[in-house]
Amino acid sequence: VQLQASGGVLVQSGGSLRLSCAASGVTLNYYYSVGWFRQVPGKEREGISCIRYGSTYYLESAKGRFTISRDNGANTVYLQMNSLKPEDTAVYYCATRNARRVGDTNCLTPAYMDYWGKGTQVTVSS
């Protein structure tokens, strides 16, 4: 399984950005949870948004600004980020897991996910 995140750039505060996560070796269908996480140096990785069995979940600070979506045909997951703030600056990662695997059900926790892509840097200037 390989996940490739892309789309991270330098953007001004208030701007928008769309991150993409292309998958290979796995089909990101209904039975695979997918999520976006971010991490800044010195802090733990945190879940931004995820999809599990068709339901979407968001970090409180991402609600109303970020939208996660999945293109099954392209086997790609997206994160549309609007109204970006300097505190959104981080390395963003995508991840996936077979939702049918018994265990934790909270897809916003990093421990839930099994496969990770390399991160993409998002920098929001003030």
Image (spheres, helix red, strand yellow):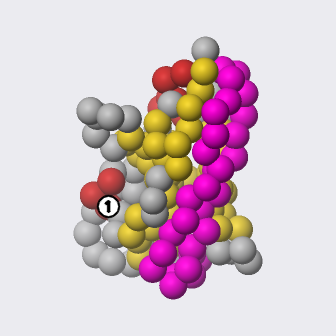
Q: Residue at x 27, y 58 (%)?
A: 111
Tell me if mark 1 has few (under 14), some (14-19) or many (20+) residues whose alpha carbon lies within 10 angstroms of its own.
some
Position of residue 3 relative to residue 16, above or below, is below
| Number of marks | 1
Q: Residue at x 65, y 50 (%)?
A: 7
Element on which disc 1 rests: helix
Residue kind at label 1, given as amino acid type:
Tyr
Q: Residue at x 52, y 30 (%)?
A: 88
**Can you give x and y, in whole percent of width and height, for residue 44 in the image?**
28, 39
**Residue 42: which quarter of the image?**
top left
Residue farthest along the bottom direction in this orientation: 25
**Can you give x and y, in whole percent of width and height, for residue 94 in the image?**
49, 58
Residue 52 visible? The answer is no
41 left or right, relative to 99? left
Q: Which residue is mark 1?
A: 112
Position of residue 42 relative to residue 86, above or below, is below
Magenta stretch?
Answer: 1-29
Position of residue 67 relative to residue 76, above or below, is above
